[in-house]
Amino acid sequence: VCPDGKYIIGSGKLQSITTAFNMEKILTAIGNKDFTGDEEGIPVLDYEKVKDAEVEVGLGPLHTQFDDQGFAYTSLFVESAVAKWKLGTWEVVDKIPITYNIGHLATAEGDTVNPDGKYLVALNKLSHGRHLSVGPSQPESSQLINITDEKMKLLYDAFTEPEPHYAQMIKADKLKPIEVYPKEENKNPNAIWDVKDAGVERSGASVTVKMVAVRSTLEPTSFEVNQGDRVTIY
């Protein structure tokens, strides 16, 4: 879906076009129950009535994301390229070759209402030996592309795990991760917070062990029980 919500972009690997469907037309057709039939009980809209344009982007279009200047970027799996095209005028304005067989792509905040633009990452399915051999299991490639100018420019290759799918790119200063879970979030009445509270308690054949973990160390480091004991470890 494009940033202003006006269009839904659909593609298929076995064709050379990407289709821009009009969201308002889709909602109107749904409201009027203007369907051509159904597939396993799911109503099917009339393709011709809800599309605004077919964009001839290239061979094997797969995934589309957006920048902050009204451009869309579509991955071309068969052609091994990324096509840049203009929403509204539907013209392809640039292409950049990719190595090789791009699947998904990610532009900076490119599937939000306010894309950041600037960069695109091509999530490629094949690297074909563009890296040093690292053994029987070989990485594939992701490629960082500058999209700020009229022409796209390749900046960097990174070799990543095979079959990357649907990545997200977000400004680091928008992420506020915690480093330690807040103590008050732990509602376990048997939780302990100090190594001095760790230990073993026995009541008949019932044994309760309370442990503290600090990195890879557990305290107490060992304990002994009798065969037949019922042991509970916290």
Image (cartoon, grey):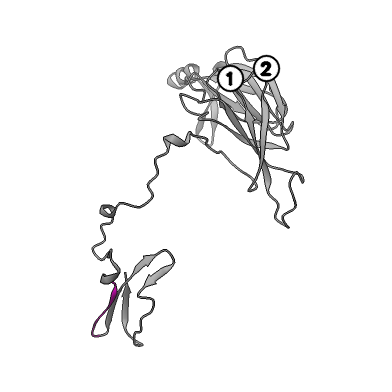
Tell me if I can see residue 56 in this picture: no
* Mark before the other along the chain sequence, 1 or 2: 1
In the rendered image, which residue does mark 1 sit on? 71
Residue 4 rendering spot, x and y as whole percentages: 47, 19
Residue 160 rendering spot, x and y as whole percentages: 64, 46
* Quadrant holding the C terminus: bottom left
In the rendered image, which residue does mark 2 sit on? 93
Q: Residue at x 64, y 24 (%)?
A: 18
Q: Residue at x 65, y 30 (%)?
A: 75
Q: Residue at x 36, y 87 (%)?
A: 227
Q: Which residues are magenta?
A: 198-204
Classify 10 Å Cα crowding around label 1: few (below 14), some (14-19), many (20 and above). Answer: many
Report the front residue among 46 and 183.
183
Question: Element under label 2?
Answer: strand
In the picture, residue 223 is in which quadrant? bottom left
Magenta stretch holds residue 20? no
Report the front residue among 233 and 17.
233
The circle drawn on residue 177 is: none
Give the residue type that dot 1 points to: Phe
In the picture, residue 37 is in which quadrant? top right
Q: Residue at x 42, y 63 (%)?
A: 215
Q: Residue furthest right?
A: 129
In the picture, residue 12 is in which quadrant? top right
Give the residue type that dot 2 points to: Val
Q: Main secondary structure of the magenta part?
A: strand
Residue 228 rendering spot, x and y as whole percentages: 34, 86
Residue 64 rendering spot, x and y as whole percentages: 59, 28
Tell me if I can see residue 155 in this picture: yes
Q: Tags 1 and 2 in contact by the CB under 8 Å rule?
A: yes
